[in-house]
Image: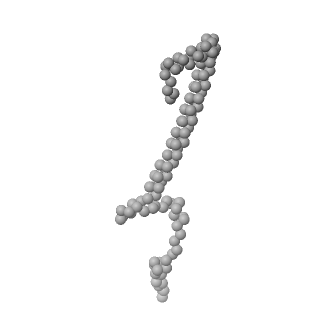
Amino acid sequence: MFDVAWSEMGLVAAIAVIFLGPEELPKVVRAISKVVRGVKRTADEFRRQFDEVLEVDDLKKIKDDINKEIKLIAGEDGKMYESYGTADLGKIHTSPNPASSPPPLPSYKES
């Protein structure tokens, strides 16, 4: 991530020993490493939650695609037609066609 050579790290360590002294240096290094671990942990948690959100979004898209395909059925002519579930049947309103209704039955009178 950072392009730091060993010589540069040694120079920073030497400057830290000069300014902080050998007694304070271990405390400062521990504090810095604690902060770095915390930042790393927070970044990992954020990345995990972000991946979960993406996964849930992908699963919703897959579910919607599957439900869309389930609603399509193949007809005898090989074409795909939209199917209707039982919940959709109540929404379909058909008006009776008088031409297609059967003729009335003849009435018989008994004598």
Q: Is residue 68 above or below residue 32?
A: below
Closer to the camera, 50 or 71?
A: 50
- Answer left or right for 14 relative to 100: right
Q: Position of residue 40 (x, y in %)?
A: 56, 29
Visible residue check, residue 4 = yes
In x, y percent, where is residue 20? 63, 15
> Is 10 rendered above or below residue 47?
above
What residue is drawn where x is 62% and y is 21%?
31
Q: Is residue 26 visible?
A: no
Please report the residue visible at 59 percent of the width from the left and 29 percent of the height from the top.
Answer: 39
Residue at x 49% of width, y 19% of height: 6
Furthest toward the bottom, the residue is 111
Closer to us: 19 or 94:
19
- What residue is shown at x 51% (from left), y 60% (from top)? 86
Q: Quadrant of residue 42?
A: top right
From the viewer's side, name the closer residue of 39 and 94: 39
